[in-house]
Amino acid sequence: MNSLTLSAPAKLNLTLDVLGRREDGYHEMKMVMQSVSLCDTLTLTVGPGEGIALSTNLGFLPLDGRNLAAAAALRLREETGADWGKLTISLGKRIPVCAGLAGGSSDAAAVLRGLNELCGLGLSLPELAKIGEKVGSDVPYCVLGGTAMAEGRGERIAPLPTLPECFVVLAKPGFPVSTPELFAQLDSQRARCHPDTAGVLKALQENDLPGVARRMFNIFEEVLPSRKRAQVEELKGELLRCGALGASMSGTGPTVFGLFEREEEARGAEEALKGVCREVFLTHTV
């Protein structure tokens, strides 16, 4: 039996723009993405037998093909014909679930990378990302990671100059978010604000962390229900009061994050937000 343990980092949207609805029903996206050190941990074991056995520390998660970690393994076997016998996946979740941080997609990407290594499949990262596209829209980015532009429905990935290393405080409010409802809201009204993506790209080229931070914006904040939007704005305001260079929401939310140059300020923000949210994390860019 062969085993491998991997980390699955969370992602942030430094910018998130929706350019319109496509003929295939998906939406045309333009996003600047960033990996952070907050991560899930997966241990993959292959050996005699057949099937997939998935276990996790969160009892409410599905353990079959509805879980993206298992779905990624099934898709990889379908695409390559690889026969690894029985696959056991032990998944330690730390990234909040349904939070806009691509936790499930990152788990799927880790399974693709891990099985590629364990089974000697010899696939390149772009080839794995192409397979991941059929598992979920965020999976191609999560295969590649780092600082990158994602376009299309998220499958077209282009590396960008690395965001200067900084501390990140994440806070997940207690309310749920419906991704289909947010897309429907965008379809039904004209967005008033769009991110300054070009400005963010220029700031990345100039290694200008404050320039990136003050231009961060997520178009989905525009169409949140008013009470939820007020909570997001309150969290962003608290992060800025604690010294964040900028603050925004990630994905379709509800997680809010702030970028900090100094660890002391980030730790102060972490403590301040623990009084407001149950799930608060201090992490850093990777």
Image (spheres, helix red, strand yellow):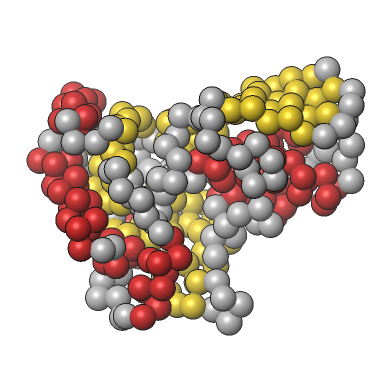
Identity of the residue drawn at 27% across and 51% down: 248
Q: Is residue 83 above or below residue 255?
A: above
Q: Position of residue 116 (x, y in %)?
A: 76, 36
Name the image quarter holding the N terminus: top right
Farthest residue, direction front: 60
Q: Position of residue 284 (x, y in %)?
A: 36, 31
Q: Where is residue 163 in the image (x, y as percent from the top left)?
A: 38, 43
261 with respect to 9 (left or right): left
285 with respect to 23 (left or right): left
Picture quadrant where residue 111 is located:
top right
Name the image quarter holding the C terminus: top left
Front residue of 114/171: it is 171
Identity of the residue drawn at 75% across and 23% down: 45
Q: Position of residue 270 (x, y in %)?
A: 22, 29
Front residue of 44/188: it is 188
Farthest residue, direction left: 241
